[in-house]
Image (tube, helix red, strand yellow):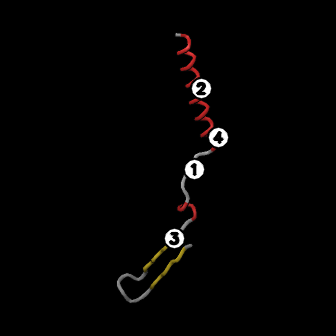
Amino acid sequence: MVMDHYYQGADPYPYVNYAFRISAADATADVPEPLSVGLLGAGLLGMALVRRRRAARR
């Protein structure tokens, strides 16, 4: 939604612009991609398995 108001008159500021803007992109939050979250989970799982194997060898 965009509302603009232009005023041209006899005052020293001939153009007055009042703008009010609302964008749907501003109202959303960033959400991580499912693939990125899955990749992070796979990496953490792999690190846990490596640690478990190293602990079992000792």
Q: Is label 1 in contact with label 2 (beta carbons under 8 Å)?
A: no
Question: Can you give x and y, in whole percent of width and height, for residue 5 in the image?
Answer: 49, 81
Upstream in the sequence, badge 4 or badge 2? Answer: 4
Taking depth in this image into account, of 56 and 20 the one nearest to the observer is 56
Q: Which mark is residue 8?
A: none
* Classed neighbour count for the residue bearing mark 1: other residues with Cα under 10 Å, few (<14), some (14–19), many (≥20): few
Above or below for 6 versus 36: below
Q: Which mark is residue 31?
A: 1
Q: Residue at x 43, y 80 (%)?
A: 15
Residue indicated by mark 3: 21
Three-letter amino acid code at disc 4?
Answer: Leu
Q: Which mark is residue 46?
A: 2
Upstream in the sequence, badge 3 or badge 2? Answer: 3
Tag 2, which secondary structure?
Answer: helix
Circle nearer the viewer, 3 or 4 = 4
Distance from Cα at disc 3 to Cα at disc 4: 34 Å
Residue situated furthest bottom in the rendering: 10
* Classed neighbour count for the residue bearing mark 3: other residues with Cα under 10 Å, few (<14), some (14–19), many (≥20): few
Residue indicated by mark 4: 35
Tag 1, which secondary structure?
Answer: loop
Circle nearer the viewer, 3 or 1 = 1
Circle nearer the viewer, 4 or 2 = 2
Above or below for 23 versus 13: above
